[in-house]
Amino acid sequence: FLLWQSEDFNDDQTKISSSHYIDGEGWSTVETIYSDNSRYIEENPSITVDSNGNALAIWGWWSDSSSTGGIAYSRYLADGSWSQAQDLETGGGYTGGTSITVRENGSAVAAWSLYDSTTGTKNIMVNRFE
């Protein structure tokens, strides 16, 4: 799986896109799994894949209009479909450094940094997906 952030300056949207390699066929068609013209997407989204071919992608975002940030995610099922993106963390400060890994039991653990503008500190946040 490949996952990346891009910007479309024609329609002022930032996007998260994905493609994956299919044995015997090559790379899949690029699929946009998230796009928004009110949120800036961080440059380094993260993805993990379990042994059944299911994937979980996370990325940070920032909204200039509300001066808040957060973390969003989407799931890819081995049947070939991405879920609608969901917010995992909202209303926080600037987020960055997203990372995610899948464990042997199939659960996933995501981590990211969250900047607290009130205290001027960065906190490490963690979430577990079952």
Image (cartoon, grey):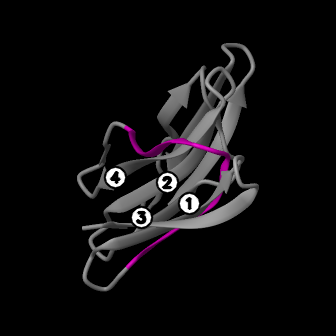
The residue nearer to you, when weighing 42 against 75, is 42
Crowding near the residue tagged with mark 2, few <14, some 14–19, many ≥20 C-alpha atoms within 10 Å: many
Mark 2 or mark 3, which is nearer to you? 2
Query: Of discs 4 and 1, which sits in the foreground?
Result: 1
Residue 129 numbered mark, or none: none
Q: Amino acid at mark 1?
A: Ser
Question: Closest to the observer: 49 or 92?
Answer: 92
Residue farthest along the top direction in this orientation: 11
Q: Main secondary structure of the magenta part?
A: strand
Mark 2–mark 3 distance (CA, rounded to whole Å): 28 Å
Residue at numbered disc 1: 46
For the residues labelled 1 and 3, the Cα–Cα distance comes to: 26 Å
33 or 107, nearer to the observer: 107
Question: What residue type is disc 2 on?
Answer: Ile
Q: Give the secondary structure at mark 3.
A: loop
* Separation (CA) of disc 2 from disc 1: 5 Å
Closer to us: mark 3 or mark 4? Answer: 4
Mark linked to residue 76 = 4
List the single residue furthest toward the front: 119
- Residue at position x 65%, y 20% from top? 65
In the image, the segment drawn in magenta is 85-102
Q: CA distance from mark 2 to mark 4?
A: 11 Å
Q: Earlier in the sequence, mark 2 or mark 4?
A: 2
* Residue at the spot of label 2: 58
Label located before the other in sequence (1 or 3): 3
**CB under 8 Å between callouts 2 and 1?**
yes
